[in-house]
Image (cartoon, rainbow, N blue to C red):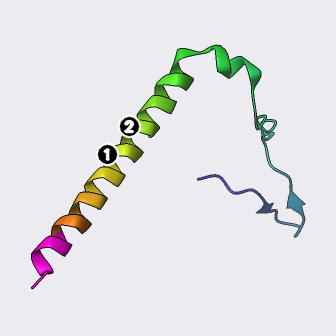
Amino acid sequence: MAKDVEVQEQGEYSAKDYQDPPPAPLIDVEELTKWSFYRALIAEFVATLLFLYVTILTIIGYSHQSDP
């Protein structure tokens, strides 16, 4: 790993030897036209749906087993 600041022999500090890339925009209009955006959106929806479905079924099953 490279250090951001290094101490030289005279006790001075040298700056980074690279430049940070500019920050990415929060909302990129170009991304709305790409299939990968919608594929990720569908995957998030399905994963959340399955997570909630399994969680609710577990709670329902536990409450049925614990009833006297």
Place of residue 33 in the rendered image (x, y in percent of width and height, measured from the top left): 65, 14
The segment highlighted magenta reads: 62-68
Q: Are marks 1 and 2 in contact (CB under 8 Å)?
A: yes
Dot 2: what SS? Answer: helix
Indicate the amino acid at tag 2.
Val
Quadrant for residue 25, please give it: top right
Residue drawn 87% across the image and 70% down it: 11
| Left or right: 13, with 34 as reference point | right
Residue at the disc numbered 1: 50
Front one among 66 and 54? 66
Residue drawn 75% across the image and 33% down it: 27
Place of residue 68 in the rendered image (x, y in percent of width and height, measured from the top left): 9, 85
Dot 1: what SS? Answer: helix
Indicate the amino acid at tag 1.
Leu
The main secondary structure of the magenta stretch is: helix
Q: Please, which residue is most extreme toward the front here? A: 68
Residue drawn 30% across the image and 60% down it: 56
Quadrant for residue 59, please give it: bottom left
